[in-house]
Image (spheres, helix red, strand yellow):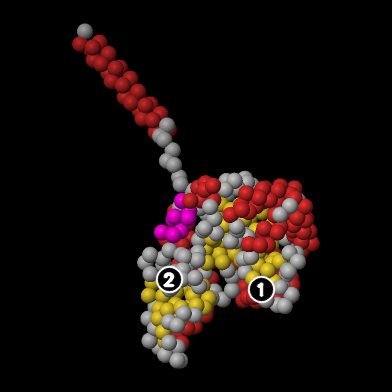
Amino acid sequence: MTSKWLYAAGAVILVVIIGVLWLGRHEKGQQPIQAVTVEPDLELAAWVVDWKWESGVDDLELIGKQLDRLQVFAAYFDSENRLYFTEDMHEALPHIFETARKGGVKYVDLTIVNDRWNSDGTAVQKDPGIVSRMLVSRESQEEHIAEIIDVVERYGFDGVEMDYEKIGEADWEKLCIFYKELHERLQAKGKALRIILEPRTPIERLPLPEGPVYVMMAYNLFGSHSGPGPKADHAFIKKLASRMKVLPGEAGIALSVGGFDWAAKGKVTSLTEKQAVKLLRRSNVAVPMRDKASGSVYFTYKDEGGQKHTVWYADGETISQWIDTVKQAGYTNIALWRLGEFERSTVDRLKDL
């Protein structure tokens, strides 16, 4: 009786051990898979302009591999409301296309801006009257679309970017309808459409069409219209990004390099990064500081006449901080205004993105 009991007890213990081992292996095989966060790839674009195209192409040669798109700031309007390219841009286009293709840039787009060049050589920037006249009738809209498509196909651009600014309140609804028609016509040709939005654009109440990529200008916080300060700060970028949630479809944010020089007597001069650094190095007493709220560099100096100047500009560290702020807000489509006279340290930062 005792031996039978011992055998029975041993059998039970053996079954329990086997069961424990089996359960352990089974549970090990069923362990939950740990979620791996994959950060979305950054989509980087940049503009090249006619008045700084040579230095723009120099920067393009250095960072072309980092760019998904290149925006060629090329098409203005003449006094007859027809698309107009400057002589500088006619000279630049072959070099821009060649450098972009060699550098591996996937898409080269034509940017159209509502600046008017008059026959006497004067220019009017961001003329809302151009947009009003283009929208005045169905026929005028159709003519504009046909001209855009003709220019894009003739020069071999991959898409169009519309940079119409200072739009009159009465034109917004018609412009949204125009954008929809333009997108559909371009899409049928295999061409993309991007639309630039100013911070002042009332996006919350506009019937913007689905399909185009919308790019918000996250700059001009301070500039020629104001006293000294950064082109953007982190709070400004976050606020714009929050507003952009109402946009239909894909959206991105444009950041601006360079800066401004504010003279004490009121003159304000736009600066590239290299120009700002040159001013800093030329002064023996200027001490550069970095603003925590914006990541921008600022300093003061006196010119040869003794007049005080205040300079604010964005360098590679600034751009890196702004890009991080944009990404934290949930956006990875970023455009840089503009190529031309980057410092080497900024180029290196962009290469590491």
Task: Tell me residue 253's x, y (percent).
Answer: 53, 57
In the image, residue 215 sits, relative to residue 120, either above or below, namely: above
Label 2 SS: loop
Label 1 SS: strand
Amino acid, disc 2: Gly
**Magenta stretch containing residue 113, yes or no?**
no
As measured in the structure, the alpha-carbon distance from the residue carrying label 1 to the one carrying label 2 is 27 Å
- Which residue position holds label 1? 123
Give the mark toward the camera: 1 or 2.
1
Task: Tell me residue 201's x, y (percent).
Answer: 54, 55
**Nearer to me, 142 or 14:** 142
- Which residue position holds label 2? 229
- The residue lying at 38 percent from left, 26 percent from top is 22
**Which contiguous range is marked in magenta?**
235-242
Q: Residue furthest top?
A: 1
Majority SS type along the magenta span: helix
Task: Tell me residue 129's x, y (percent).
Answer: 66, 62
